[in-house]
Image (cartoon, grey):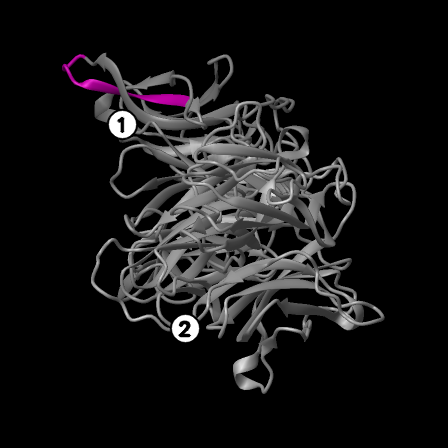
Amino acid sequence: MAAGATLGSSLGPALDEPAVAGTAGSASTAAATVSPRGVSTLLAYLSGSTPGVVVENLSTRHSVRVLPTLHVTDPQIAPDGTLLAYTGPTTTPDGAGAVDAGLFVTRADGTGAPRLLATLPTAAAVATPRWSLDSSRIVYQRVAADGSRKTDVIDVRGGKTLASLSGVGTDVRFGSDSSTLVDSGGPRSVGAFYAVSFSGRRTLVEKNSASSVDRPHDLVYSPQGRFSVFVRTMSRAGRADDDALQGVTDNGDILPDSISSINGMGWSADSEDFFVSAKTLEPPFTAPFGRSALYRIDRTRGNVVAVNPKATADETSLSVGSVRRTAQTPGALFSPLAPTRLVDTRSGLGAAKARLGSGRFLKVRVAGVKGVPSGATAAVLTLTAVRPSATSWLAASPAASTPVVPSKALVALAPGQSSANTITVPLGAGGAIDLYNRAGTTDVLVDVVGYYAHERGFAFTPVRHILVDDSRTATRHLTAGSDYVIAAPWPVPYDATATTISVTVIRPDHAMVVSIAPHPVSGDPVKPPTSLLQVPKGKTVTATTTVAIGGGGRYDLFTNAGSAVVRVETTGYFAPTATKAFFPLSPRRILDSRTGAGAIPGSASDLGTVSVHVAGVAGVPIDASSVVLDLTGRRSSNTEPVPVDEMTNQVQSADESMIDLAGRAMTTNSVTLPVDRDGDVDLDIEGARTYLQADLVGYFTD
């Protein structure tokens, strides 16, 4: 057979019957975002010896375990993703007192009860169900009472047997329509493919001419019937048989000597990717030698990647379906603002002139004021607690008619020490947020630096921690009475409107309030009446913010007192040419290194690198480019002294310092981090007895 050939035209329309229109299915599994193709690929497979069938959505990386208490055989998901066919035990004893097997279908989302389609006597159970492309029919095999093998076709909706054939081989599937079968294993079809009608009529499709010892089998059509692939088992003297895939790419075989023991396969809905579960013999397959794993093969380029590179159990009996994605509100775009104060409880601006008490809420309206449009969906705000009376923390959440006490800190408070943090928070009822103070009393400042909206704004492009400025290697310092001008570096483009940066102020000689503003197009820089950081004398504090880029591609830092070393890094920018929109999420804790919750097995819990898998977690799609996290660093309750300097008790990502405890019991920072190719973000914890919590609040994607 010619490499890359498709058999769709050879089989053509039905030989004896008109094609039957497929049954429309509706799956409850929904993806988080909408792609141009509008569908998500679903994989169904067995994982090790664990009961049940894993059904995994590749767009969201959400998975469910269907039939979690049963050990089933050869599960096959329908192409439309609605149903799962399998062979399993029935509750009906056979004549010898044993329990019969049965061919069942059940919902692929794990809801509802299984439905028995056919009973298979235990002593001769076979099944091996295969779906038609339109998901309306199943072909399976059984052993009849006289010991002969039968191939039956059943209508899934009505349960009616449409055909019962003899003399068909063990490798039988549907052709390019629902009324034609393809046989590649019968006594007359060794080394060939035959089209078989429901009446039993056989037509030679193609004879294998590669080698008399290379047997083709398991022909699989793409959803539209345009492409096909089959397995060719190659017998070689002195070594075990190898499997090769033919027809996947336009260039013929896919690494014919690199895989063995193929035990499941299928096409994506758009026919661009082919998936296979198989054992590995050599690179580039990435699973451990001799273990069965899932692989994705690009049809046009032939690239091969492991679907779950960190899987620890054999993944077998793969089948592939798809589900139409549900429409969702498009992602939001960002518009920067010059820092503007919304609330100051010291003067009564935007709120009552009173300190925020213990366990009290303060509702702050954001949308429709100070340049933020009424249609804004989220805002970037700097929260500052001024001279708190007790150890406490501030939190913010979307406004609700009945506020709920938040479970996570956004600004950590120590008695008498002012603290600040810049956060991204979705807006709730009335375009407002609810601020909450856990204990004691404190004055509160709220500054807005930008907002997200659907109607207008700029998309995001992430970059991997580019050092913008480090005054330790220069002759200048951040000093009171003068501005500290910073130029946005390459690859931030000239037309960028804002950049996401991390600012670390290292051991100032005086307590200081640090503020930031876009550089003016003309005239001298002017210190804004807002704050970014509150830094105690001799301490090191880090904050992440998004700042508008001003004249000459620059922005300015200011301090009200003292002098300090400054380090600035960027993690991305907003520009007309960028493509990543923001999708806010309900906050969810995805890491607590005190317990190991959320950390990938093998990463450190209180010292070293912690890897957090975010792709496919809590609504984040697999193709997310960046995530927005609220980080909380905590000291252990251990009272043994810990040396403190600028490089101790830090939480870092790559070279960027994101949290520096510097002698404090707790501190917070909100960060935007790029997602790596494995769907992870890596955080380095430096210093003993340092613990980290991470709460997911949103993501960026196309």
The furthest residue to the right: 522
Mark 1 to mark 2: distance in Å?
Answer: 53 Å
In front of the other: 266 or 479 = 479
| Mark 1 surroundings within 10 Å by alpha-carbon count, few (fewer than 14), some (14 through 19), many (20 or more) | few
| Quadrant location, the N terminus | bottom right
Q: Report the residue at 51% width, 38% height from top.
A: 356
> Which three-letter amino acid code belongs to the residue tagged 2?
Glu
Q: Is residue 115 above or below residue 601?
A: above
Q: Is residue 693 left or right of residue 520?
A: left
Circle 2 residue: 646
In front of the other: 269 or 389 = 389
The span picked out in magenta is 95-105
Q: Report the residue at 42% width, 55% height from top.
A: 667
139 magenta-colored: no
Q: Is residue 599 left or right of residue 576?
A: left
Q: Is residue 207 left or right of residue 18?
A: left
In front of the other: 142 or 687 = 687
Please indicate, yes or no, whether residue 697 appears anywhere in the rendered image: yes
Q: Report the residue at 50% width, 60% height from top.
A: 676
> Which three-letter amino acid code belongs to the residue tagged 1?
Thr
Provide the secondary structure element on which disc 1 rests: loop
| Mark 2 surroundings within 10 Å by alpha-carbon count, few (fewer than 14), some (14 through 19), many (20 or more) | some
- Where is residue 396? Give x, y as percent: 53, 40
User: Which comes before the other along the chain, label 1 or label 2?
Assistant: 1
The tag on residue 223 is none
- Where is residue 212? Give x, y as percent: 42, 57
Provide the secondary structure element on which disc 2 rests: loop
In front of the other: 477 or 546 = 477
Q: Is residue 214 above or below residue 539?
A: above
Circle 1 residue: 69
Q: Quadrant of residue 71?
A: top left
Q: Which callout, 1 or 2, points to the residue nearer the camera?
A: 2
